[in-house]
Image: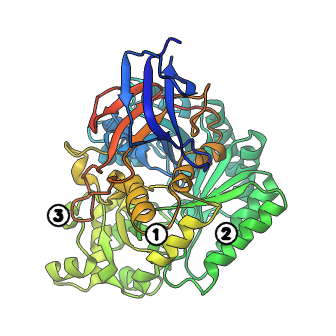
Amino acid sequence: MALDVVIRHGRVIDGTGAPWVRADVGIADGRIVAVGNLEGADAPTDIDASDLIVAPGFIDCHSHSDWSLLANRGADSTLMQGVTTEIVGNCGMSYAPVTALNEARLASDVARTSPGISIAWASFGDYLDHVRQGGIGANFAFQVGHAAVRSAVMGSEERVATPDEIAAMARLVDQAFDEGAIGLSTGLEFVPGRAALRDELLALSRVVARRDRIHTCHQRTRNEAFVSSVQEIVGICEEAGARLQVSHNNKRRGAPDGAWEATMDVQEAARARGVDVSCDTTSYIAGLGLMAAVLPPWLFDEGPAIAAERLGDPVIRQRVKGDLNRYWLMVARGEWDILWLGRTSNSMHHFGKSFIDIADAVRKQPLDAYLDILQAEGPGIADAGMFGEVKSHDHLRELLRHPLVAIEADAWTASMDGPLAPMVNHPASFGWTARVLGDYVRDRGWLRLEEAVMKFTGMPAAKFGLRDRGILRPGLAADVTIFDAATIADRASFDRPAVYPDGISHVLVNGTVAVSEGRLVGSRSGRVLAA
């Protein structure tokens, strides 16, 4: 048997949830060709995995690495976590399609998140071609974002779409599917997606269903109306006949007792009726958010640049304070000690500080300090980030253990060095897989090891239609992660988020070694996984 790579003596976890077995893995031409006893086989690359776990390459089913990928084509922090595939274009956000109506905003976003890169594409297909040029270190599957589609048709206006505008959006989504998008994402808590009503979402979901793609949705709220938010999007996708993934389906502070359980009951009941719906969660108790989502919609009726300018008017600012959107109740309640500033364009000197500390530094009330930061962002006001405590450890445990919940990062690829490192504001960019496998599996015993691996391999692969990945089986793509279950650990923190984890030995992407003995090789064997 002619092999390119043989991995010997490992404990193979195949990604289905089945108990590990002792076996060798043989790889040739980028594919797994054998799993079993390969004692007599030779290969140019021979990896001894004694006492290590050999698993499918990890899949991040909710990533924002499209933000930074063009400036980090090697996908450094992705690979060093054992992640070989990311589903990007989430929460309604993608960098295509581009028209004259949204080019300025998208160009600003690209320049901020991928320093040195400028927009050189228009259609979704152009964008994917641009990603392919120069190679990528991991595999990426791209969704088309509703916010990009909406702004391509309507510009920055936050209002109800007309029937003609909805039809134009549907055509752009259909075109993106023609050109390789695996699904449509919506971000119904964020500007401008929160202005979309049922008719708009139903029309786009019908395109998703007709093209057999997937709709991923960051629902409208996880606070008081958590249950009705999930009911809304489940009902829309059920009527349309579309597959649905509900993004980071955790309750937030202020959600009624039993709200999360009720959202899971909604999904279970829909599944019993034949609706393909499930959800996912991040692996940390602190999560990311967008600061502008707390601002009232009327502030944006002339676009983001004017909205930022208006915050400088004392009368308008006072009106805003009385009309805050209850996106994160921690803002409305003034729980500033558990909210921290994330990535911004013009206030990075306050990055990572709590809003209590920022307020003390500028000698203002926390809400005014918060609004000052948004005002300073100008046209980029809608993209200013924050993070805060969004769930308890008890709630995280029940999320991770639920059979309908996959595990995701909700972060983006970066590197420990270079211009992207200071932009990392959450340890998930570097440590989410190790956090699960080390802390929650080995140390706390919340999940079986095989179950945890399944939740970021076989489970997302099946849900997102990645039919040749996520499982270690002959004939499938040779994406493989080898790690030490006894030592794997998340070393990133909110104080030092750009630190690689311990315990990941080797990573192979499409049969090529990308991480060897815990070090990046510099290979770019990843692919754009188009539908």
**What residue is disc 1 on?**
293
Q: Mark on residue 230?
A: 2
Given the image, on which type of amino acid does mark 3 rest?
Answer: His
The crowd level at tag 2 (other Cα within 10 Å; few <14, some 14-19, many 20+) is many
Given the image, on which type of amino acid does mark 2 rest?
Answer: Val
| Lateral position of residue 175 relative to residue 315, left or right | right
| Lateral position of residue 114 relative to residue 242, left or right | left
- Contact (Cβ within 8 Å) of mark 3 with mark 2: no
- Contact (Cβ within 8 Å) of mark 1 with mark 3: no
Mark toward the start of the polypeptide (3 vs 2): 2
The crowd level at tag 3 (other Cα within 10 Å; few <14, some 14-19, many 20+) is few
**Residue 128 in the image: above or below residue 44:** below
What percent of the width, then of the height, locates residue 370?
Answer: 30, 75
**Residue 465 in the image: above or below residue 18:** above
Q: Which residue is found at the position 49% from the left and 30% from the top?
A: 24
Q: Nearer the viewer, mark 3 or mark 2?
A: 2
Q: Which residue is found at the position 37% from the left and 23% from the top?
A: 46
